[in-house]
Amino acid sequence: MGAEVTISLDAMGGDQGPEVVVPGAADALIRNPDLRFLLIGDEKRIRPLLEPYKRLKERSEVIHTDVAISMDQKPSVALRKGRWHSSMWLALQMVKDGRADAAVSAGNTGALMAMAKFCLRTLEQVDRPAIAAIWPTIDSECIVLDVGANVGADARQLIEFSVMGAAMARAVFNLEKPSIGLLNIGVEEVKGLDHIKEAGQALRSTPLSFRYHGFVEGDDIGRGAVDVVVTDGFTGNIALKTAEGTAKQISAYLRAAMGRSFLARMGAVLAQGAFSALRDKMDPRQLNGGIFLGLNGIVVKSHGGTDATGFASAIDLASDMASSDVVRRLADDVARFQTELQLEGAA
């Protein structure tokens, strides 16, 4: 038996709310039997959904609120009207108060980030939080950040993202010195925007607790060239959505090709095991969930349109983050790196 981890769930977030959140929690509990849940939302909708899941019902507490943040609500409006009473805010408040080790929501990303920054605050010496996602590679997985929290990022923020991504890689992948790459239009040092080149120079010249690989290109992400790929949220979000769309496109091509003739259908039957493995590898639900790095607490954002399988993956990520003490590790790494930068500047 491992250490018990409590996760607060915004049961009203996402396109389908508790109809996805509850079975997703039940699925996650099978893999992580030491989990406990705080299900926050409309009790009249949540309670009947718990009935088929005896184990989940025993390990869950329902906290009622009938206030929910809509998927299209502006972050400023959500923060003003949803603070204190909404299911999203209360899920975060549970983390702040120490009642939960992590919060998971499939709700409005902008609203969740605004509320998380206001409720939990950023770590000292962190300018902006970032959303980090686990990305499948040919042989394993890597971390990509930022994938949507910040439209732009200057050199200092890219450096902070690198330090935070390295801390996450140590916690999730159990790597002593993960490799970091800055996403760029080429690997040559002379290519790219000035702030990317400036960040690269700082990372190359400063003693680090991780290995700075240099610049990487878009195709290096899937190849697994580095353990952590760093970019701004605008570029990272486009890359993430492009990869998900490409996976769906390839799946559609394969289905069409396998049904084109009798021989193709027979071949599909014979290769069913291989196609099943490929489908699982390309299924974005298996790696659903982005963690907000840089906050005084663990917050995981699930895709709003995911199903129970995908939401369970987001819970798995939250559980892993809570068990690995990633917030403390990240705070220590950021403080150490800022000290190293100051010493380097004074030399």
Image (cartoon, grey):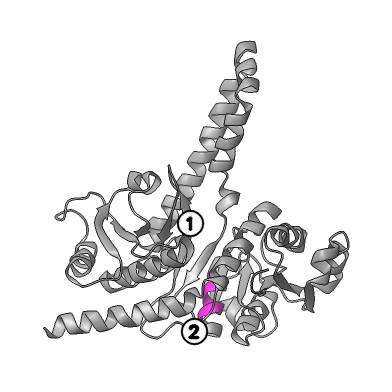
Residue 248 lies in what quarter of the image? top right
Callout 2–callout 1 Cβ contact below 8 Å: no
Reply above or below: 237 against 79: above
Reply above or below: 340 against 219: below
Q: Position of residue 259 (x, y in %)?
A: 63, 20
The quadrant the N terminus occupies is: bottom right
- Few, some or many residues within 10 Å of mark 2 (<14, 14–19, 20+): some
Is 14 displayed left or right of 165 in the figure? right
Segment colored magenta: 110-117
Q: Is residue 151 visible?
A: yes
What numbered label is drawn on residue 121?
2
Q: CA distance from mark 2 to mark 1?
A: 24 Å
Q: Residue at x 62, y 69 (%)?
A: 104
Is 73 displayed left or right of 133 in the figure? right
Name the residue beneath numbered marker 1: 134
Is 102 displayed left or right of 347 in the figure? right
